[in-house]
Image (cartoon, rainbow, N blue to C red):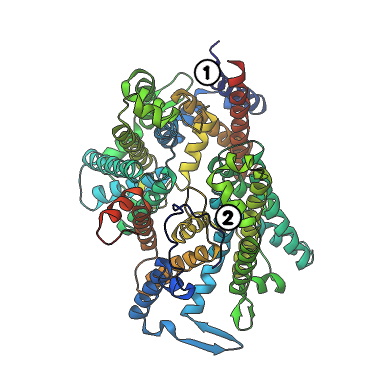
């Protein structure tokens, strides 16, 4: 991957040899972790890698992992950008509920599906914009600013659905959640397209660099002439947009909008995916594809626990263990320990 | 008038105003019966919010309190119903486990230098997961001690009942106010919230204080879990889902600054009561649906954050 980075090593030293990108990709801890989790799943369930073609689409556990992981992956794409600016968006789960509620309610009231989808996306954009305004104009810490919408958002969603689970049978909305394109489930296609588009936009333009600059030091970025406020607004609005897409997928999947349970706790999964993907919570460096990979690792673990016959509740314990391992690895303490090991010097 | 008391005063005035408004709409709300139920129904939230106040005063956040409450209810239920321990012994064990859990989180926050919200997020997963591994189903608690506690109360003038659960909450608030404003630990917490570096330079034992803060928060969450099990007579891993958010909202509405170093435990009490008032009003009204609670609490949260910004942005210029 080509990415503009600032080289902070003293100029006297020779530059590090440039590693081959493909080899570098396969030796990343995230890729190794994903491979390990998948292999464990395969050991538990020999048919895990079997993919069959049926009724014009692929079926198999692997496809299922991709399909189930898509909403969190989409959330993680938006969340990566927010976390890169040293923020966090706790409201994405609630925004998912709002977006699903808007689409479902409009469709059941006779509005055509494309307009309902646009309205749902618009609602997501508005929610994101609201978060962005709180963070930039009112200068509230992101965790608290987005907490407001996290608390009130589910209430708003229930207000829209009038407290019921709005079910629908609109083919377009159901297609978003359960349809397939080129044999792949629609959620996977949407997540992949979004990931590619977002990665291209932030890496082929200066946007990614600017976001990293704001994340590392917001005042310094402002003094350097960046419009930090506008960037933050864009980033939070984008996170709201991603949440709205995920909300549409979840609503289409269950053919209904459940204001109470749609996207419940998914904000935490999304944050976890981003952290697994190596984006630091302290802002700065970020990687969208790695965050998507993180979402896939989480989903593979979920699937693995399900097929191995453990109760799904066991998931939470495993997830917390993963967070703890990552935290210990990322901490300055372990960095010091590693440096003391012989041969670990650069 | 001390300027630092202003947010507390504002919260109190808003509570009184809201209560008056509620009473003009629903005259039946003005009775000690309703007030007694306020205390009983929000006891677990209040106790957890006290712990949250200390955490937020120190500049951190604790997302694990709801999960610790849920875990404690399950642990208490398992100890009483499966191992046939006396409830008081079960409570003691549960509180020790909860305190140790918080201490470990505090140690992780301090020694690994990770933001508190991610550590307590892991703690939340662990506590919820641990609770459901212990028992995925709800366990009803039947014990003569439980029925005895649930039946004992102090009759207030006007027919209101101050239950044991309500008294525990009031006692926790009283002790916490003393702890925050009259002890060295309290001053250390405020110092840490003001600036960790300055606190360390002033000789505040940062490691010990951080660990104690999270241990205290989890201890109080454990106590809230005990209260919750007394209140519902059941242990269930999904008990108290999302209480951490209510607790944070109560602390913020109570005038504590989210950046740390500023606030009052007494404000949190009013924050909890204000949330209880919203809920009670919606129940009394009968036509409004329960989702309005969330919206109103969200709006209140927003208003108070805005208020804090206005008060504190103007502050440096004036002094």
Marks 2 and 1, how far apart in space? Answer: 37 Å
Circle 1 sits in a helix, a strand or a loop, which is it? helix
Along the line of sight, which residue is nearer the eye, B89 or B128?
Answer: B128
Residue A49 percent across, percent down from the top left:
43, 83
Q: Position of residue A272 (x, y in %)?
A: 46, 57
Q: Is residue A177 left or right of residue B243?
A: right
Chain name for mark 1: B
Callout 2 touching callout 1 (CB < 8 Å): no
User: Mark 1 = which residue?
Assistant: B4
Give the vertical position of A262 relative to B141 (above or below).
Answer: below
Residue A136, placed above or below residue B314: below
Q: Same chain for the residues at labels 2 and 1, yes or no? A: no
User: Where's the N terminus of chain B, which quadrant?
Assistant: top right
Q: Where B80 falls versus B12 (above or below)?
A: below
Q: Label 2 belongs to which residue?
A: A81
* Place of residue B198 in the rendered image (x, y in percent of width and height, measured from the top left): 40, 27
The chain carrying label 2 is: A
Label 2: state its secondary structure: helix
In the image, residue A61 above or below residue A226: below
Q: Is residue A159 left or right of residue B62?
A: right
Residue occupying the far front of the picture: A12
């Amino acid at each position: 991957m080509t990415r503009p980075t600032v080289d902070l090593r003293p100029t006297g030293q020779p530059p590090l040899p440039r590693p081959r990108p493909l080899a570098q990709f396969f030796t990343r801890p995230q890729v190794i972790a994903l491979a390990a989790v998948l292999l464990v799943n395969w050991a538990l369930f020999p048919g895990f890698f079997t993919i069959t073609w049926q009724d014009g689409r692929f079926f198999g556990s692997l496809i299922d992992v991709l399909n189930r992981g898509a909403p969190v992956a989409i959330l993680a794409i938006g969340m990566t950008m927010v976390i890169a600016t040293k923020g966090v968006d706790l409201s994405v789960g609630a925004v998912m509920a709002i977006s699903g509620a808007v689409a479902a309610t409009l469709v059941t009231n006779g509005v055509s599906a494309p307009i309902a989808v646009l309205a749902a996306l618009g609602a997501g954009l508005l929610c994101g914009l609201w978060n962005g305004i709180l963070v930039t104009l009112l200068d509230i810490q992101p965790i608290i600013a987005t907490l407001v919408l996290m608390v009130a958002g589910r209430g708003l969603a229930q207000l829209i659905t009038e407290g019921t689970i709005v079910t629908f049978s609109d083919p377009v909305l159901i297609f978003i959640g359960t349809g397939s394109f080129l044999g792949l489930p629609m959620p996977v296609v949407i997540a992949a397209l979004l990931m590619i588009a977002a990665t291209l936009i932030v890496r082929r333009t200066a946007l990614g660099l600017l976001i990293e600059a704001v994340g590392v030091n917001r005042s310094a970025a402002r003094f350097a002439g960046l419009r930090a406020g506008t960037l933050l607004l864009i980033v939070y609005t984008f996170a709201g947009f991603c949440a709205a897409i995920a909300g549409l997928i979840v609503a289409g999947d269950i053919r209904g909008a459940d204001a109470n349970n749609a996207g419940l706790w998914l904000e935490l999964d999304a944050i976890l995916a981003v952290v697994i993907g190596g984006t630091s919570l302290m802002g700065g460096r970020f990687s969208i594809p790695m965050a998507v990979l993180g979402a896939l690792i989480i989903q593979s673990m979920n699937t693995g626990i399900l097929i191995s016959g453990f109760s799904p509740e066991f998931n939470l314990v495993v997830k917390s263990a993963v967070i703890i391992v990552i935290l210990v690895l990322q901490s300055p303490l372990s960095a010091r320990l590693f440096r003391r090991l012989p041969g670990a010097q650069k | 008038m001390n300027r630092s008391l202003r947010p507390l005063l504002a919260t109190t005035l808003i509570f009184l105003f809201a209560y008056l408004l509620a009473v003009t709409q629903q005259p039946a709300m003005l009775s000690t019966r309703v007030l007694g139920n306020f205390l009983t129904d929000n006891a677990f939230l209040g106790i957890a919010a006290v712990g949250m106040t200390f955490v937020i005063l120190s500049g951190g956040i604790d997302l694990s309190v709801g999960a610790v409450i849920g875990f404690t209810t399950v642990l208490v239920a398992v100890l009483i119903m499966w191992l046939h321990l006396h409830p008081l012994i079960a409570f003691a064990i549960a509180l020790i486990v909860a305190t140790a859990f918080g201490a470990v989180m505090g140690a992780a926050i301090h020694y690994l230098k990770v933001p508190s919200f991610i550590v307590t997020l892991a703690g939340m997963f662990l506590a919820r997961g641990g609770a459901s591994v212990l028992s995925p189903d709800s366990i009803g608690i039947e014990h003569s001690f439980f029925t005895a506690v649930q039946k004992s109360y102090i009759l207030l003038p006007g027919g209101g009942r101050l239950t044991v659960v309500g008294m525990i909450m009031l006692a926790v608030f009283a002790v916490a106010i003393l702890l925050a404003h009259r002890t060295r630990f309290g001053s250390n917490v405020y110092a840490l919230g003001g600036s960790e570096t300055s606190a360390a330079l002033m000789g505040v034992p940062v490691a010990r204080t951080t660990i104690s803060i999270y241990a205290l928060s989890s201890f109080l969450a454990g106590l809230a879990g005990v209260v919750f099990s007394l209140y519902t007579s059941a242990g269930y891993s999904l008990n108290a889902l999302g209480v951490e958010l209510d607790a944070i909202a109560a602390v913020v509405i109570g005038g504590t600054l989210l950046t740390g170093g500023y606030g009052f435990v007494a404000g949190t009490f009013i924050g909890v009561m204000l949330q209880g008032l919203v809920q009670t009003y919606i129940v009394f009204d009968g036509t409004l649906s329960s989702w309005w609670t969330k919206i109103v609490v969200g709006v209140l949260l927003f208003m108070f954050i805005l208020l804090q910004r206005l008060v504190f942005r103007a502050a440096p210029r004036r002094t």
